[in-house]
Amino acid sequence: MHKGYLALVLHAHLPYVRHPEEDQFLEENWLYEAITETYIPLIQVFEKLLEDKVEFRITMSLTPTLCSMLQDELLQNRYIRHVNKLIELADKEVQRTGYDPKFHGLALMYYRRFVEAKEIFQDKYKRNLVGAFKKFQDIGVLEILASCATHGFLPILSVNPSDAEAQVRVGVDYYRKTFGRDPVGFWLPECGYAPGIDNYLAEAGIKYFFVDSHGIVNAEPEPRYSVYAPLYCPSGVAAFGRDWESSKQVWSSKEGYPGDPDYREYYKDIGHELEYEYIRPYIHPIGFRINTGLKYWRITGNTDHKEPYVPEWAKEKAAIHAGNFMFNREKQIEHVSYHMDRKPMIISPYDAELFGHWWFEGPIWLDFLIRKIAFDQKTVKLATPSDYLREYPANQMAVPSTSTWGYKGYNEVWLEGSNDWIYRHLHVAGERMKELAEKFSGCMEKSKKDLGKRSLDQAARELLLAQASDWPFIMKTGTMVEYAEKRVKLHINRFTRIYEGLMSGAIDKEWLKEVESRDNIFSDMDCARYYMANVGIKT
């Protein structure tokens, strides 16, 4: 019999990026790349495991912003155009590399991958990848987590309790609408926790969430089982702690598997390497060179010298690394279980986009790992947190400590010199949103066509979009800073214009219609009512 459990947790999230005003918007590529390189490969792994009757259980978040984009007709059409371009480019590469044995096989590999991606997206799932993941949950192999409406960072947003509550409540209700059931688990954006945040989850009916390892280790009182069993917060919601050892083996580009010399090199793409006129139709129309996804080199070493990628070598390494990961978890569980009166639970959460996008071999590694756990050992069993709570409903009560899974483990990434300016605006807008909801509460019951109701709901959407944790994160990391700053200012300015229009009784109908068409997330939800006092969770 197995001696303990392993929970593989994949956090799938992207910020809401949708620009109908421009035909080709650079940042929309984040979604298209993730579809091709992460979400479809994961779907393929799950499908093949089911086909081969391999027993497995995976936990995965699909955030509201990601689900909204995946289900948006405009973005779906643009993805088809995107993947058609990739197929065309890969076909040209097959011809160009015809007499080069080092790269011809790779060009053929990419051509097949892009054709398969289009077939799965368009033909098999009718452009509805959210429906694909819902199918896996309905079958019983996947447990999908709810998350905040726009990935708002709750430890800071909770300065205004109504802001934190709205982030949670909108996210939970969106989950219900999307997946047709109540969520059991919740992904706190950035694993950002501070004592009391669990109360918002409890009110929404959530049973468990995750914190980083030090959130559990530093809990009060001291946890008896460290991170290997959950704690119940005073609210009754269970907190599971990330296992640092298993996380580092996969996360770290230096110590972890993704940095192996035989794996594909992410930072060397033909979009930046080939002759400009040849590659020009496949990069940004104004001439920006961008990644195409066609990468012919392996990591090789720590120098600029790179050798051609050999898929067979990489696949072999993925199998070896999957076996190593499983062996380490076996020994870890054997050791920990000796000191516990229950089976330990190892929580291993990762960004889903690591698998396939950043670490090309990640989905292959995951497939090998699941199969090895199913057939090659009897110590570890894959399970979800809800599985564990059903087996062990009685757990220690304690209050986890303030923590995140960001740099240094606390709030520094989302609150420091590069991004602290945004919060005075977010907090004032949050106070104003609550003011609007209370002052114009009568509008909540009116028709969706009513100008006042539309204005209130759009004000809430603009505030939620401005609160995304992605914007301060981008400002901190120094990538696409101009875009992140523009998004915060844009949504705050739009919110302020609606606020002033409602207070003065002068709403610009045509302008509001245009804004509604651009920022159309949660368009079928009465977003403003989530800011009203004493409103139940269910809509």
Image: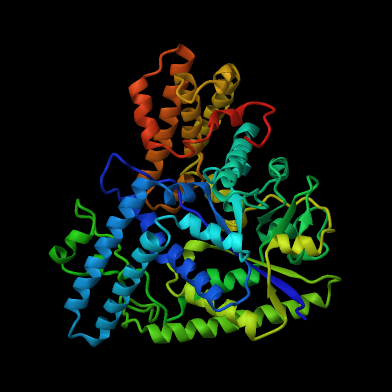
Which residue is nearer to you in this view: 102 or 190? Answer: 102
Image location (x, y in percent) of residue 147? 59, 48
Instruction: Please state, as top left, top right, bottom left or bottom right, where the C terminus lies in the image.
Output: top right
Image position of 204 (left or right of 90): right
Q: Is residue 80 above or below residue 52?
A: above
Image position of 524 (left or right of 183): left
Image position of 316 (left or right of 537): left
Which residue is nearer to you in this view: 372 or 468? Answer: 372
Instruction: Please state, as top left, top right, bottom left or bottom right, where the N terminus lies in the image.
Output: bottom right
Q: Residue at x 17, y 60 (%)?
A: 280
Asked whether residue 74 appears in the rendered view, the answer is yes
Which residue is nearer to you in this view: 219 or 101? Answer: 101
Please tell me how many numbered marks the rendered image carries: 0
Residue 335 position by quadrant: bottom right
Tell me, what colour scheme is on the image? rainbow
Residue 144 position by quadrant: bottom right
Image location (x, y in percent) of residue 39? 45, 62
Image location (x, y in percent) of residue 58? 61, 66
Image position of 390 (left or right of 495): right
Q: Is residue 177 above or below residue 284?
A: above
Image location (x, y in percent) of residue 377? 68, 85
Q: Residue at x 63, y 26 (%)?
A: 532
Asked whether residue 256 appears in the rendered view, the answer is no
Residue 482 position by quadrant: top left
Q: Residue at x 60, y 69 (%)?
A: 247
